[in-house]
Each structure stands twice: as C-alpha cells, then as structure tokens.
Image: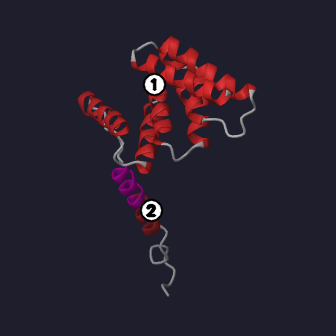
Amino acid sequence: MPILVAEISFKKGLVALARGNAFEAAQHFEHAVVTERERRVPRPQMRYLSYYGLATALCRKPTPESIRVCELAARTDSFNPVLELNLGKVYLLAGQRTKARAAFRRGLATAPEHAGLRLELDRMEAEDRGSGRRGLGLQDALGALRSAVSSLTHRLSPARRGAPTP
C-alpha cells in the first residue's frame, strides 16, 4: 500500500508540474521520496528523486542539493532518458550549459527519438547560433581530438627526431 501512495503522490506532482505549479509539484515528489524511504523500499524509484530535484530547482533557484539528487538519479538509472532530460534542465537553470548539453546527449544516446531531449538540444543550439557562440558538436569534438592526436603523433614520430625508421 505505501508504494501505491508514493506513486499517487508522484502522479499528482506530474500534474502540478504540467500546470506550472513547481512548488506544489515539489511537495508531491518529496512525499513520494519520503514514503519510499520510510518504508525502506529496496529499489527506490529514481524518477521520484529526479522530478523532486527538477521541481525544487524550478520553484527556487537550483541548489547543490537539487543538482545532486538529479545527478544521483541519472547515474543510478542510467538508461532512463527522462532522468537525463531533468538533469539537463536543472543544469540549464544553474547556468551550466556544457553539462546540460552533455546530459541531453547522453539521453539521446539511449533514446535517439526522444522529443523532449531533441527539443532542448535544438533550443540550445539555436541559442548558440543566435548569440554567436558555437557549441562543440560531437563530430566537431571528435575531429578536433583526431587532429590533435595526429599532430602529436607526427611531432613524436621517429623520423622527425632523427632516429632510424624501422
């Protein structure tokens, strides 16, 4: 029965969040988390924790706790793209764009067609283009890494140091 109570609180939190009431949502999500903790549920729902972190970051400014709980949830349930979405949103609220972009990309690696993750990443890229900033895409990062390794390999090659080549 307590697990059902936690799930009902969670669903009420989702409704409150959808209505734009982050404070009420945070209360419901917290109730779900506390209910599971009190009942010593062996495998707590990480989505309860993740949404609690998101809702508290929305109703107040993001705190180290809201970031920490979202990170914990995403790390614990690493194949759940929604947890990466929530983490990315909290990072954005905290002004940590690089971490937000990484969270969205991790989520898309798990669920390439996830509309929410795609929307957030596309929004960030549009903002980057509009402000003159350039986000480093995965292909760009791999290309830069490849170039750096190639350059380093070339500089350290035996032929360049005067050593005989095999």
Quick check: 43 above or below 18? below
Q: Quadrant of residue 67?
A: top right
- Check disc 1 and give the amino acid type: Gly
Left of 125 or right of it: where is 31?
right
Residue at mark 1 to residue at mark 2: CA–CA distance: 32 Å
Question: Do we see residue 60 in this rendering?
Answer: no
Q: Which structural element holds mark 1?
A: loop
The residue positioned 36% from the left and 42% from the top of the image is: 114
Is residue 141 highlighted in magenta?
yes
Label 1 vs 2, first from the N-terminus: 1
Q: Which mark is residue 163?
A: none
The residue identified by callout 2 is 149
Q: Residues within 10 Å of mark 2 (few under 14, many from 20)?
A: few
Span shown in magenta: 138-147
Q: Nearer the viewer, mark 1 or mark 2?
A: 1
Instruction: Give how far across and how far down residue 129 sits, in percent.
Output: 25, 34
Instruction: Give how far across and how far down residue 111 sits, in percent.
Output: 40, 48
- Check disc 2 and give the amino acid type: Val
Q: Where the N terminus falls, by quadrant?
A: top right
Instruction: Give how far across and how far down residue 62 sits, in percent.
Output: 53, 19
Is residue 165 highlighted in magenta?
no
The residue identified by callout 1 is 95
The residue positioned 42% from the left and 56% from the top of the image is: 145
Q: Quadrant of residue 9?
A: top right
Front-most of 70 and 144?
70
Instruction: Give how far across and how far down residue 61 sits, in percent.
Output: 51, 15
Q: Which structural element holds mark 2?
A: helix
Question: Do we see residue 78 in this rendering?
Answer: yes
Quick check: 78 above or below 129? below
